[in-house]
Image (cartoon, rainbow, N blue to C red):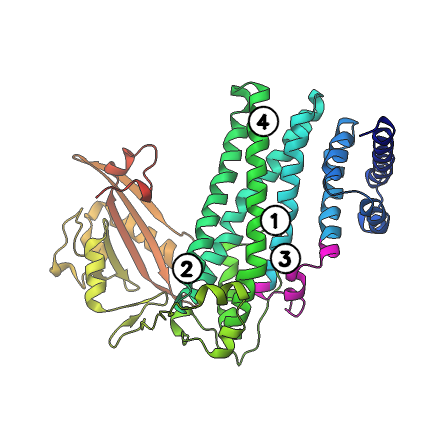
């Protein structure tokens, strides 16, 4: 390249940088970012996407606050999305606020912003010499990484626990398996970034920043790639398959898991729409549903017969336990297998039930129907009565005790039990030997199991 052309290129970038710096200073002085949107659009439209990170790094080195640049980064993502008019915007357009699918799309916008910021600040950190700026950028990176860890506990967890069962039921298990595998890879990448930030003082600075920049780039790409897969393949698949009743069931459970940087309002397709759980749906796909699937999914299904899951959850004679269905035989076997000793005292203080299997204190059939006060030494009956009175009046939610009994370290916990209307039903006594658990150290995960 000729010297004159190089000089012109550098001068042009310097001019663009000065324009951006002026806008960023106005943000810093309190002007609303949204009001500057059009001016940013004009400046950014004349800058190659490859130039933006370079200019941003130069601005950081010149003392522009990292948080102000973060605001520009948010705006840059938004403007870029407007320019390409992505599939996600078209797909979410007709979805009402609070609809679970719209919430997933909105979360992905936040994930894209944070993925881009992670990459930007990691690269900026690697070129920053000023100690004060390094500390500021590290602080911002710690915030971003802490936020990104929450994706696995919210966004990905809701997909895995609430939406995967519906497509698995319909025989599309491969889609769920691939996505879950990718989710776990991203979880590991972000966890590794957390580990690097914690260990930064124990390694040379150059080694730390190079390792962090490389790993941050990988994580950023993986997060963005997942957004693309979800927006263009998985979400259109869900939209084609799930009915209002299924989405209603999903929305009823979402709050238990939580959301990533969004707060969706309540949503209900109507009182006449019954919530449908995976085991309640007809898993067979109609021709219309198959034709409504994304091309990539249709292509993957060609020549492969779908194996619909037609198993019935509730069988004849099963007991509805609210969170599942069990036969009496299964229920007895479960209590027998539990590594705890469970006893239930009804609202009239009489022993109604004790579990088979694990035994800490002696229990015989003759104790059934006996007043609980007569099951304790006379000297402690007044304490038993105080506990039960506190439970019945709602003043206490538990009473716990622990004692040595030969080689056992016995933990005893009393819990009051209420029905859905808040009426006292009785008290549960749970007793277990915690000595083996006190010796547990480190970790042993599912993948560590050996036959």
Q: Secondary structure at mark 1?
A: helix
Give the left or right position of residue 404, taking residue 265 as reference: left
Q: Secondary structure at mark 4?
A: helix
Q: Nearer the viewer, residue 237 or 381?
A: 237
Q: Residues within 10 Å of mark 3 (few under 14, many from 20)?
A: some
Which residue has dot 4 on it? 210
Q: What is the spatial separation of the Cα atoms under label 3 and label 4, in whole angstroms? A: 32 Å
Q: What is the spatial separation of the Cα atoms under label 4 and label 2, in whole angstroms? A: 36 Å
The first of marks 3 and 4 along the sequence is 3
Q: Residues within 10 Å of mark 2 (few under 14, many from 20)?
A: few
Q: What is the spatial separation of the Cα atoms under label 3 and label 2, in whole angstroms? A: 25 Å
- The reply to whether callout 1 and callout 4 are in contact (CB within 8 Å) is no
Q: Which mark is on residue 111?
A: 1
Q: Which mark is on residue 174?
A: 2
**Please, is residue 74 above or below residue 356 in the view?**
above
86 within the magenta span: yes
């Amino acid at each position: 390249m000729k010297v004159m052309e190089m000089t012109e290129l550098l001068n042009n970038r310097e001019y663009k940088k000065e324009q951006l710096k002026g806008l960023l200073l106005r943000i810093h002085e309190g002007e609303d970012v949204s009001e500057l949107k059009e001016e940013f659009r004009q400046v950014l439209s004349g800058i190659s996407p490859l130039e933006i990170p370079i200019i941003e790094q130069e601005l950081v080195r010149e003392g522009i606050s990292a948080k102000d640049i973060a605001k520009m980064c948010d705006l840059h993502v938004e403007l870029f999305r407007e320019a390409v008019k992505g599939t996600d915007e078209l797909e979410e357009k007709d979805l009402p606020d609070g609809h679970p699918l719209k919430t997933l799309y909105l979360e992905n916008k936040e994930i894209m912003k944070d993925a881009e910021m992670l990459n930007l600040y990691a690269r900026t950190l690697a070129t920053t010499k000023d100690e004060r700026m390094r500390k500021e950028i590290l602080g911002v990176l710690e915030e971003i990484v802490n936020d990104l860890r929450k994706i696995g506990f919210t966004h990905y967890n809701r997909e895995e626990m609430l939406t995967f069962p519906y497509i698995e039921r319909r025989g599309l298990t491969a889609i769920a398996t691939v996505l879950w595998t990718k989710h776990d890879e991203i979880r590991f990448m972000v966890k590794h970034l957390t580990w690097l930030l914690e260990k930064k003082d124990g390694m040379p600075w150059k080694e730390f920043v190079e390792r962090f920049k490389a790993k941050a780039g990988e994580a950023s790409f993986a997060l963005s790639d997942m957004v693309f897969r979800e927006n263009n393949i998985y979400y259109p698949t869900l939209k084609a398959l799930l009915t209002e009743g299924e989405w209603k069931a999903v929305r009823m459970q979402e709050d238990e898991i939580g959301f990533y940087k969004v707060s969706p309002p309540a949503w209900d397709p109507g009182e006449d729409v019954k919530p449908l759980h995976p085991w309640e749906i007809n898993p067979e796909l109609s021709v219309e549903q198959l034709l409504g699937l994304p091309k990539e999914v249709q292509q993957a299904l060609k020549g492969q017969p779908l194996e619909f899951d037609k198993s019935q959850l509730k069988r004849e004679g099963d007991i509805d336990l609210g969170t599942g269905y069990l036969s009496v035989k299964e229920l007895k076997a479960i209590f027998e297998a539990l590594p705890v000793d469970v006893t239930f005292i009804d609202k009239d203080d009489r022993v109604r039930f004790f579990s088979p299997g694990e035994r800490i204190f002696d229990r015989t059939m003759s104790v059934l129907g006996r007043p609980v006060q007569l099951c304790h030494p006379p000297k402690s009956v007044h304490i038993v009565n105080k506990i039960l009175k506190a439970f019945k009046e709602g003043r206490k939610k538990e009473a716990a005790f622990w004692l040595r009994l030969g080689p056992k370290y016995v933990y005893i916990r009393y819990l009051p039990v209420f029905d859905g209307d808040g009426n006292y039903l009785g008290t549960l006594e749970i007793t277990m030997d915690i000595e083996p658990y006190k010796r547990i150290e480190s970790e042993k995960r599912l993948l560590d199991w050996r036959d």
